[in-house]
Amino acid sequence: MDEEIYKENILDHNRNPHNKKTMEDFDLKGEGKNVSCGDAISLFIKRDEDGRVSDVGFNGDGCAISQASTSILMDKIKGMKIDEVKLLSPGDIYDMLGINISPGRTKCALLPYEALNDALTK
Amino acid sequence: MSISQKIKKDFPVFKHNKDLVYLDSAASSQTPKSVTDVVNKYYSEYRSNIHRSMYEIGETATGKYESARESVAEFIKALQDEVIFTSGATMSMNMLMYSLEQYLSLEEGSEIVTTVAEHHSSLIPLQQLAKRKKLVLKHINITSDFDFDYKQAEKLITEKTKIVSASLASNVLGTIYSIKKLAELAHNVGAIMVCDGTKAAGHIPINVKELDCDFLIFSGHKMCGPTGTGVLYGKKDILSIMPPSIFGGGIVEDVDLQTAKWKSSPWKFEAGTPNIAGSIGLGEAVNYLEDIGLNEIHKYVSGITEYAIDRLSLLNGVKLFTQKNADKNIGIVSFSVDGIHPHDIAEIAGREGVAIRAGHHCAQPLMKELGISALARASFYLYNDKSDVDVLVISVKKAQEIFKR
């Protein structure tokens, strides 16, 4: 039996995603799309003078894994220095989620990571 | 022969996967043993190239390949010379577009009429042809009961229209469309009618004379045939004049350094060594399905579709995007569940052994028209039964329990 991916925290974040809001005042914007299953998100980052992430927001819809992953990642990067955010890897995302991601759900889990890269490299 | 548990025994995949509830035949169907046997037989008993060998096994190979063509021709009520073997519907459509570019006089501003519900395999080649020749691409809408808006089609198809292209059945909504109506409108203005029969072939009887399409495309793998096989049918008169668009060996009668003279159809359109074993397998799939009877298959599948529509309609929070008249449905029920993304529905269904599909189903424009990003889709075929629907319903309920909506 596969380890349960729909754990309580994942379902919570999916039901009530943290930081789900459109931001008018932002410095960085990135987009991620998982064409095969219809997930699409935009994320917004505001940084302060110290180069730290002072506010985050995202909008868009998708499966529970991609919504939860985005919600949790947004929580994580708040307060981090942009330089540290740039060092995040897919492995960090999997650790952050704490669930077994099968090959079929990789793109879902890494959707916010893709959007983040888009924001940081534009 | 009636359809029963006996049919399921013809498909070894269900012996290997005892709990498999396969509801994804619209993505690809399962293969009966008689088809894989015939494919193996080619490779183990008489493998050789076709149309050129002067020894016994070569003649056997050629005979079997052309006999498969004959079976396919009879299957769609066409002439043998009108049946071209390809590697699938996508290849058929692409080839056809490039050939039509040479055959039709497509002046800038001429029009192509298709629909909002087409699969990308026919829509994108049409878009590309329009781009190359600077044509205008128009789309027939879908009505609230998920049929084509034929009234709108009457207005869209004019003397400017050169090609009308539409599916015989929808791979998302399940609707079996009236191609005959569109063909009549097309021919009234001197336009060519192209029919994408991929979802329909092997699921309902097809008669190209009744449809009156000028071209029909379909794939073998959605009708119990091997992957990498398919057909392009064209009316004899057009095929005799239309030039090929894929070039190579086997299509020429006479070649000198600068020019080549084409063979006649269908060989003109079959460059290179084809998927010989695959096409012979496709012929066997046709025989297998014909033995059961296409009307019987459709009637049987309609019964399951109706049952699925009834059971799913009773669930709170489930919305159906499907042709509710089961007789007019090819065997597809697409649906959404409130608060649960289709990908999560499919994941949870998968745990119960139920194979369904989630996403845009290669019909992104249709999804946009319907105002949704993705749908879950269950598709039924001759090896399914009503108990499969029961397991699907259990898995949808389980998903709702997990997401507590």
Image (cartoon, helix red, strand yellow):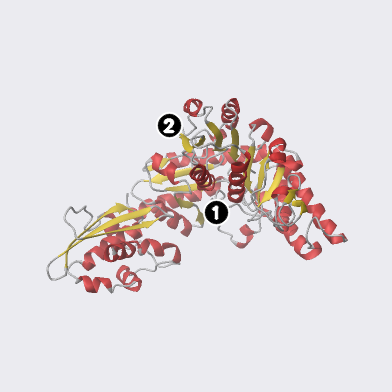
Residue B244 position, x and y percent, is 67, 47
Residue found farthest to the front: B258
Q: Nearer the viewer, mark 1 or mark 2?
A: 2
Q: Is residue B393 visible?
A: no
Tell me if label 1 and label 2 are in contact, CB under 8 Å. no
Q: Nearer the viewer, residue B272 or B405?
A: B272
Residue nearest the observer in this picture, A57 or A104: A57
Q: CA distance from mark 1 to mark 2?
A: 31 Å
The amino acid at mark 1 is Val
Residue behind mark 2: B144
Tell me, for residue B21, which label it has, or none.
Answer: 1
Q: Give the percent coordinates (x, y) of residue B296.
A: 66, 38
Residue B369 is labelled as: none
Label count reads 2
Q: Name the residue furthest left.
A: A49
Where residue B330 sits in the image (x, y, percent)? Answer: 57, 39
**Residue at left 49%, top 52%?**
B356
**Which amino acid type is marked by label 2?**
Ser
- Quarter of the image with the N terminus of chain B is top right
- Category of crowding for the residue at label 2, using alpha-carbon neighbours closer than 10 angstroms: few (below 14), some (14–19), many (at least 20): few
In the image shown, does A13 or B367 lie closer to the viewer?
B367
Label 1 Cα crowd, 10 Å radius (few <14 / some 14-19 / many 20+): many
- Per the image, label 1 sits on a secondary structure element best described as strand
Q: Secondary structure at mark 2?
A: loop
Horizontal side, residue A72 vs residue B4: left or right: left
- Left or right: where does residue B205 sit relative to residue B356? right
Judge from the rendering whether residue B273 lies leftward or rightward of residue A98; answer left or right: right
Res. B272 image quadrant: bottom right
